[in-house]
Image: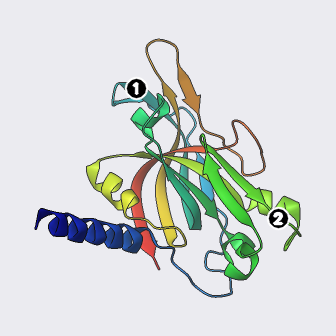
Amino acid sequence: MWKRLLLIALIAWGAHTWWTQRAATHGPGIVAAAVPAQDPIGEGVAFEFRGYRLTPLADFSVEARVLSRENYRLGRESELSPTDFALGWGRMSDEAVLTNIEISQSNRFFFWRVQEFPIPQNEIETSATNVHLIPADRTVEKQLDDVRRGQVVHLRGYLVRADASDGWHWVSSLSRDDRGAGACELLYVREVQTTL
């Protein structure tokens, strides 16, 4: 009897995991047209957060398609940012384009690969980014946990610099045109909204 109950529990868990992690689809067409909005803060007032000192560098708002998402539990960065979203806007939110681009995430980086370019390389690189997400509170953390690949998400918060008392630091990119190490946004997320 207990084997049957265990089997039912495993099937239910598998079905729940598949349902909550399935990718959202939209069909061809751009679903997030606007580029991210960013306004410099100037001398941002630093604040303490989870044992770190966060300094706001810019107000930041983005509506984009979630190209991929990756959760992290290891490494110092995961204490602040347990999740990264790879986000795309403009033609990088168009399913007709994305079917020709292989996208993945690993070790806090976002990777893409193509056999043939569906759009110019520079457009791929400047219309997508990897964002390290720092949830402002438990409500935001739960909302971020519920976001699925393919959904359109609207995030609002601050691009920040994080400092620890031992000298460790982590600094957000402030440009959409940079590439490679240091090009990711470190976003203190205050608001989350999603659409299918």
Identity of the residue drawn at 32% across and 70% down = 16
Identity of the residue drawn at 60% across and 40% down = 107
Q: Earlier in the sequence, mark 2 or mark 1?
A: 1
- Describe the element under mark 1 as helix, strand or loop: strand
Residue 52, disc:
1
34 displayed left or right of 53: right
- Residue 171 horizontal/vertical position (percent): 59, 32
Identity of the residue drawn at 82% across and 64% down = 114
Q: Around disc 1, counting alpha carbons within 10 Å, would you say few (fewer than 14), some (14 to 19), or many (20 or more)?
A: some
Q: Around disc 2, counting alpha carbons within 10 Å, would you say few (fewer than 14), some (14 to 19), or many (20 or more)?
A: few
26 displayed left or right of 95: left
- Residue 175 horizontal/vertical position (percent): 71, 46
Identify residue type, mark 1. Answer: Tyr
Vertical placement of 19 versus 88: above or below?
A: below
Instruction: Quickly name the residue at label 2.
Output: 114
Q: CA distance from mark 2 to mark 1?
A: 39 Å
128 displayed left or right of 132: right
- Describe the element under mark 2 as helix, strand or loop: loop
Q: Nearer the viewer, residue 122 or 189?
A: 122
Kindly indicate the quadrant of the structure image that contains residue 94: bottom right
- Residue 87 horizontal/vertical position (percent): 61, 61
Residue 164, disc:
none
Vertical placement of 191 versus 92: above or below?
A: above
Identify residue type, mark 2. Answer: Val
Vertical placement of 8 versus 111: above or below?
A: below
2 vs 1, front mark: 2
Which quarter of the rendered picture does the N terminus lie within? bottom left
Q: Nearer the viewer, residue 96 or 65?
A: 96
